Amino acid sequence: MEKKRILYVSHNLVGVDPFGGVEVYVDLLTKTLPEEYETLIYYPDRKDSSGKRIFLLNVKTSQKTEHTFEREYDASFLLDSERESWFRKILHQERIDLVHFQHMMGHPWSLPLIARSLGIPVLMTIPDYFPVCHRANLTSSEKQYCNIPHLPLVTCDICLQKNYGVIFGSQSSRRTFIAAIFENIDSIIFLSKSEREIVESLFPVLKGAPKVLVEGFPIVDRPFSLELRNNQNKVLTVAVPGNFKITKGADSLCKIFNAMRDEPVEFHIYGANHIRSGTFFSEISQALQGPNIKIHGPYSEDSLHENLLKADVSLLLSVWPETYVLTLSESWRAGVVPIVTDIGALGERVEDRVNGLKVPVDQPGSVVQLLREFIADRNELKRMRKNIHKGLYCKIDDHIGVITGLYAKLFDQYGVKSGNNAYFREYPASRKVSASHVFRNQERWANISFYLPGFQNEHKPIWKRKVNNAKAFMKRHGLKTFVKHSIRKLLLVDK
C-alpha cells in the first residue's frame, strides 16, 4: 500500500534563525508520524531577503528542491498568480494527499484555495495571531499588547498607518479575505482556548464551527521527578527559557536582574538573545552582565531538559497573549514551578498557587517579591511542585493520535483510499463551493505603503527597507505616481 503524502506549509525550518515553537513542532511531528505517512515541508528561505526562494524538503530522504520566483514576496499580497501556479504544480507532481498549513507568513493567503480546487483535504494550525494582523503577536510599536478584541477596528487602521503607512480600510480588506479562506478549510486547530476566543472575536465565521478544535503543541515525554532541588542553605536557581526578546518580557526580566544582583539567587538564561539594537539595548546589555546572571545561549531540547532539572523556578513573562508556550510544558516536565504573566495561554494553563504563580504583565516587582519569598522559605515551592503532573501538557504520543485521527477522517471523506496512486479524488458530497468570490478580490490588502515589509525585510535596517520598498512601489506604479505619493508623504509627516 502506498504511503499517504502530507505536505506541511510553514514559514521556516528548525535550525534556521530566528526560529521558535512552530518550527520545533513541525520538526517533531514530521519525524514522529507513523510509517504509513511520507512528509514534506514547503517553506521560504529566511536567508533570502527578497523572499523569492522557496524550498520543498522530503523529511525522510532529506531531498531538497529549490525554486526561485521572479517576483519578490510582498506581505501585502493576498493573491499571487506566480506562487499559486508553482504550488499547484508541487501538489500535482508530488501527488500530495493532504496539506497541513502551519504558518502563512512568506506565502500568499490564497494557497489553501489552490489545494481545495484540486480536491485535496486542507487543515490549518493557527500558531499565533497572523490571521488577525500583520503584527502576529498583536503588540503595538511600544511592544505592548493592543487588546484589539475590545477596541474598534479603526484602532488597527491607526496603528498600521502609523507604523507602515497603510491607508485606512486595509485591515478590513485583509480580514474579509482571510475569513473566506477559513470557510474553505476542512479543519482548523487552535493551540489554546484563549487564542481561539481572540481569533473568533474577529472572525465570527469560526464561532461554534464543528471543524474547529483546540490542541496544543506537544513535547516528548520524559521521566518525571518531583525531587526538591535545593535546601534552605543553597542559592535559589531560576531558569529563563526561550528566546530572549522584548515581547518575551526582556525589559521586566532585566529590572528583576538589577533588583536582585546582590541576593542569593542565580538566573540562567537559555535561548538566543534577539535584542541587538533599539531603545532597550544599552539597559539590557548592562543588566545581563550582573554577577548572578548565567547566559547559556541557544539550546537543544535534550540540553534544556537536563538544565531545567537543576532549576527551582522558571520565569515566563511574555507581554502578549501567547498561544501555548512550549517552555511552560518543558518546565512542568522537569518539575519546575513556573512564574508566568497572567495573559493568554500562560494565564489559561497555570493555576495560581497550585501548579505555578501568576503575576500582572510588566510588573517586575511582583516577581521580585515572590522570589524573595522562596529564598526565605522553600516549603511553598515544594507544595506546588507536588501538584505538577503529566496531564498539564500535551505529549507527542497523544498528539499523534489526535492528528492522525483528523487525517484519517478527511481521507475517508475525500475518498483517498489507496495513497498517491489515486490522485484524482471524489469531492465529499456535503462540501460546498463557496470560494469563487474570493478570487475577484483585490490582489493586495494594503493600498499601498512604502513601509509594509515582508517578514524577511523586517530584519534589515530601516533605511534599506524604505529604499527597497520605494523601488518596488515605483516599479509597480510608475514614476509619476511615485512622485505624487512621495510628496503627499512628506506633507503629512509628523512634525
Image: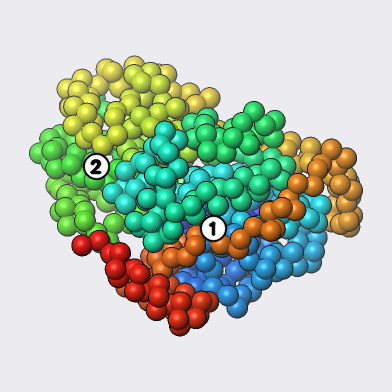
Left or right: 78 in relation to 315: right
Dot 1 or dot 2: first in sequence order is 2
At mark 1, the secondary structure is: loop
Q: Which residue is mark 1?
A: 445
The answer to whether residue 207 is visible is yes
Residue 45: horizontal and vertical position, in percent? Answer: 53, 68
Residue at 45%, 42% in the rendered image? 153
Residue type (three-letter) at the residue carrying disc 1: Trp
Residue 137: horizontal and vertical position, in percent? Answer: 42, 46
For the image, the number of numbered tags is: 2
Mark 1 surroundings within 10 Å by alpha-carbon count, few (fewer than 14), some (14 through 19), many (20 or more): many
Q: Are marks 1 and 2 in contact (CB under 8 Å)?
A: no
Q: Nearer the viewer, residue 479 or 227?
A: 479
Left or right: 383 in relation to 453: left
Image quadrant in which you'd find residue 366: top left
> Is residue 435 shown above or below 493?
above
Seen as rendered, the residue at the extreme left is 262
Residue at 88%, 40% in the rendered image? 429
Q: Nearer the viewer, residue 164 or 410?
A: 164
Mark 1 vs mark 2: in front: 1
CA gap between label 1 and label 2 equals 37 Å
Residue at 79%, 47% in the rendered image? 433
